[in-house]
Image (spheres, rainbow, N blue to C red):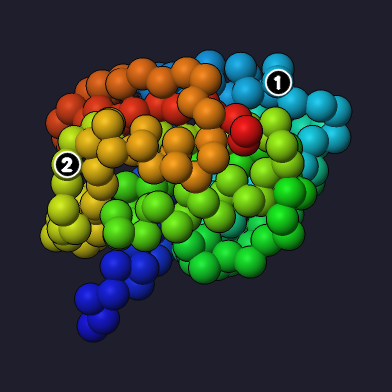
Amino acid sequence: MSDDPKRIVERGYDAIAERYAEWASNEGERSPAVEYLERLLALLPSRAAELELGCGNGEPAARILAPGHRYTGVDISAEQLRRAQDLVPSGAFVKADYTNLDWPLASLDAVVALYTFGHVPREELADLCARIASWLEPGGHLLATMGRENAPDSVEENWLGAPMFFSGFDVEMNLQLLAEAGLDVLEHEVVCQDEAEQGEACFLWVLARRS
């Protein structure tokens, strides 16, 4: 069995799709995701071009972002994408490792990445942030969650029933990566959530704009 982090994430989210959907629906009651997504929508033009990285099963971002806009969701898990397409038939969905995604420059009004950067090897985050900035039109927005603490690459052997890869930087480093990529941070805050059987998890929420 491959120990490549991307394959671990792909296999994991395929395997736990049903349990994750149930867990995430309860998690949504404690998450500020809907509030942040609505704030992002208020900043976007009509028929905005939106790209979501790590879209999962479409809840809640695809469901909220797609109506009236040009939404594309990208995920590495085929099963999560199948569920997202069923939930949001008006969206476009692409199976890909978004760290290797080729996207037209300066073509997007918004990029969204919620609860997904923690599954990316942290040495890849600087390049990823720079590429996201290049995809955004000047003035385009990024809404993302990032890590709060220094977390070297690791695998949790039983996360909701399957092995899962995690990695991340602390708040200061994450904000530095965004600034170096040419993204001006408009808002940021750390929000801690009680994830029931998974315990407390804290995320850096960031709303940024391309310079």
Q: Amino acid at mark 1?
A: Leu
User: Is disc 1 placed on a helix, strand or loop?
Assistant: helix
Q: Determine which quarter of the picture holds residue 8.
A: bottom left
Q: Position of residue 56 (x, y in %)?
A: 50, 49
Q: Which mark is residue 188?
A: none
Q: Residue at x 24, y 53 (%)?
A: 166
Q: Quadrant of the C terminus?
A: top right
Q: Depth check: 48 or 85 in front?
A: 48
Residue closer to the observer: 17 or 192: 192
Q: Can residue 28 be seen in this snapshot?
A: no
Q: Residue at x 35, y 72 (%)?
A: 7
- Residue 127 is left or right of residue 209, and the answer is left
Query: Residue 17: x percent and y percent?
Result: 41, 54
Measured Cα–Cα span from mark 1 to mark 2: 32 Å
* Vertical order, 93 against 206 (above or below): below
Residue at the (21%, 61%) spot, across then down: 163
Height in image: 104 above or below 46?
Answer: below
Give the residue furthest to the bottom.
1
The residue labelled by disc 2 is 150
- Residue on which the image places disc 1: 43
